[in-house]
Image (cartoon, grey):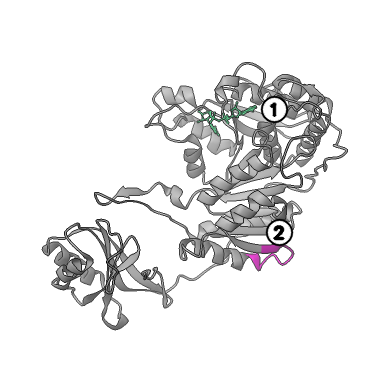
């Protein structure tokens, strides 16, 4: 589907056209994209559009990620992707297109403004205006999972220092660039002291560079409860991937605007912009769907590509349309709304208000803003690493923890001595409780004598001994110190 905004070298506002890649998607995608482009063009956006096909048709043609190889060329050339929702076919064998694009293009920051538009759109939290900044690449989403024993599966939670630094710095820079006052961090570092602990520690380090912004940290469970109860207490919230995935939907829903929210996925080189809703197949082809989510995503795109004045015009005209009560069916409310319109008429209403600003809702101004350019991270010397032991994980179902300790006691440890056995993280030897439920998945910790460092060949020797004792080792994790600080969790006692 070709767009009208491709014909001349310069747009109506006289700006050089910015190349972008566009996908019209599935279901309601083509209608809301067409409506969005009509508004952008009327507001003077200067875009040179490269269209690619993604989604259901591509999946069904046998491409498991829903995107053709040739489409990557366009994305890597333009580095800007405006994407309509797609329909993901049911069944295994179809990979998430969003996850593929985010990871392949390094889109580490997911930015989702969640705003209430009271009294024009129904909401429980009229003063809510929160931006969720979610880390997009790491955490449990690495997709590294294994069934290790008959009874136990595991998923690796990977958090890196550079990953934390990028997303947290992005959150502070975003807050500063957008006139925000506070950045909050949610983690569960009271339990995951190393992974979430790193995220929290980096947050505290980077916060010190932004004395003009208030910073705070909440444990994610109470933070989430507070967000759902009093979202007006928050401004920008930065989170690891999993919490951000869940809480960005909660935040959009309680703002009352899940159908209206747009989001940006931003990386060092590329960015993708989309509505947060799906392809709504039952609404497709009926000129009913609300195009606002995609339109507000396009506003974020315009800021990113350096057309902030166009972004301001579009956003203010949209706010004025909402304020005037011209609403699509999903947000229409008798007594509040003045006119129910379809997709195309809603776009007409926004176009008719270009140049106007809202009178009661707060107008926006993106003047002087653009894509965030993050400062280069300071050089950090690598820590001095020393290996002082090993955790050997076993698949074993032949008795009690004391029985296992007795078997391991007969193994030649090559200078390494058994110091602890845990089961699902609970210490069961020495001095375990008979009441502790045990699976077939055991962590057996071996330490070098007197805290001395140990060699890889010692560990290989230990594993050979474990094998010779007829035990099934399923993995090992070396225990290291970094500049003398232990880089592993200590066993939980009862
Ligand atoms: P959905 O967001 O498509 O629909 C949920 C509800 O919201 C439905 O009642 C729908 O009618 C309504 N709705 C959604 N967008 C609307 C709009 N613009 N205007 C008015 N009402 C709207 O979610 P779903 O039904 O769970 O998923 C449908 C398909 O979309 C699935 O194939 C799913 O995989 C896909 N999906 C895609 C994306 C994406 O491309 N980013 C995101 C979510 C879901």
User: Would the CB of label 2 be found within 8 Å of ligand 1?
Assistant: no
Q: Can you tell me which quadrant of the image ligand 1 is in? A: top right
Between the residue at mark 2 and the residue at mark 1, the CA separation in whole angstroms equals 32 Å
Which residue occupies the foreground of this view, 69 or 140? Answer: 140
Which residue occupies the foreground of this view, 211 or 420? Answer: 420
> Would you name the residue on which mark 1 appears?
36
In the structure shown, which secondary structural element does the residue marked by tag 1 occupy? helix
Magenta region, residue range: 207-215
Which residue occupies the foreground of this view, 282 or 197? Answer: 282
Q: Is residue 327 left or right of residue 223?
A: right
Find out whether residue 213 is within the magenta segment: yes
Circle 1 crowding by C-alpha within 10 Å: few under 14, some 14–19, many from 20: many
Q: Is residue 12 visible?
A: yes
Q: Is residue 207 left or right of residue 457?
A: right
What mark, if any, has residue 182 been given in the picture?
Answer: 2
What mark, if any, has residue 371 been given in the picture?
Answer: none
Mark 2 vs 1, N-terminal side:
1
């Amino acid at each position: 589907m070709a767009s009208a905004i491709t014909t001349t070298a310069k747009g109506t506002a006289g700006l050089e056209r910015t190349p972008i890649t566009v996908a019209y998607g599935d279901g309601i995608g083509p209608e809301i994209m067409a409506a969005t482009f009509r508004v952008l063009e009327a507001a003077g956006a200067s875009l040179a559009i490269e269209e690619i096909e993604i989604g259901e048709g591509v999946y069904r043609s046998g491409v498991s990620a829903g995107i053709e190889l040739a489409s990557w060329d366009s994305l890597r050339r333009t580095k800007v992707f405006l994407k309509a929702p797609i329909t993901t076919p049911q069944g295994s064998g179809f990979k998430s297109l969003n996850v593929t694009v985010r990871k392949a293009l390094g889109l580490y920051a997911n930015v989702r403004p969640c705003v209430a538009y009271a009294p024009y759109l129904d909401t429980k939290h009229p003063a809510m205006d929160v931006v969720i900044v979610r880390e997009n690449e790491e955490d449990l989403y690495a997709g590294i999972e294994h069934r290790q024993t008959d009874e136990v599966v595991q998923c690796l939670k990977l958090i890196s220092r550079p990953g934390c630094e990028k997303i947290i710095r992005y959150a502070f820079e975003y807050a500063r660039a957008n006139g925000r006052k506070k950045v909050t961090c949610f983690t569960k570092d009271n339990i995951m002291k190393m992974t979430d602990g790193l995220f929290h520690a980096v947050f505290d380090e980077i916060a010190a560079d932004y004395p003009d912004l208030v910073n705070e940290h909440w444990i994610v469970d109470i933070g989430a409860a507070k967000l759902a109860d009093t979202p007006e207490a928050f401004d920008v919230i930065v989170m690891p991937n999993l919490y951000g995935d869940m809480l960005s939907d909660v935040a959009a829903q309680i703002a009352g605007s899940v159908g209206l929210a747009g989001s940006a996925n931003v990386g060092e080189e590329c960015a993708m912009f989309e509505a947060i809703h799906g392809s709504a197949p039952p609404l497709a082809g009926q000129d009913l769907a609300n195009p606002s989510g995609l339109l507000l995503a396009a506003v974020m795109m315009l800021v990113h590509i350096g057309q902030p004045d166009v972004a301001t015009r579009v956003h203010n005209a949209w706010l004025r349309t909402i304020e005037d009560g011209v609403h699509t069916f999903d947000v229409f409310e008798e007594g509040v709304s003045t006119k129910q319109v379809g997709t195309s008429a809603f776009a007409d209403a926004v176009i008719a208000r270009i140049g106007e600003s809202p009178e009661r809702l707060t107008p926006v101004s993106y003047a002087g803003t653009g894509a965030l350019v993050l400062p280069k991270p300071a050089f950090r010397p690598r820590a001095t690493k020393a290996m002082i032991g090993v955790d050997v994980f076993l698949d074993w179902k032949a008795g009690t923890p004391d029985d296992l300790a007795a078997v391991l006691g007969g193994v030649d440890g090559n200078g390494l001595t058994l110091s602890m056995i845990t089961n699902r993280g609970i210490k069961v030897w020495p001095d375990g409780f008979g009441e502790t439920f045990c699976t077939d998945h055991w962590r057996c910790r071996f330490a070098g004598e007197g805290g001395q460092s140990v060699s890889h060949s010692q560990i290989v020797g230990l594993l050979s001994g474990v094998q010779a004792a007829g035990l099934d080792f399923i993995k090992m994790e070396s225990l290291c110190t970094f500049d003398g600080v232990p880089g592993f969790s200590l066993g939980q006692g009862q």
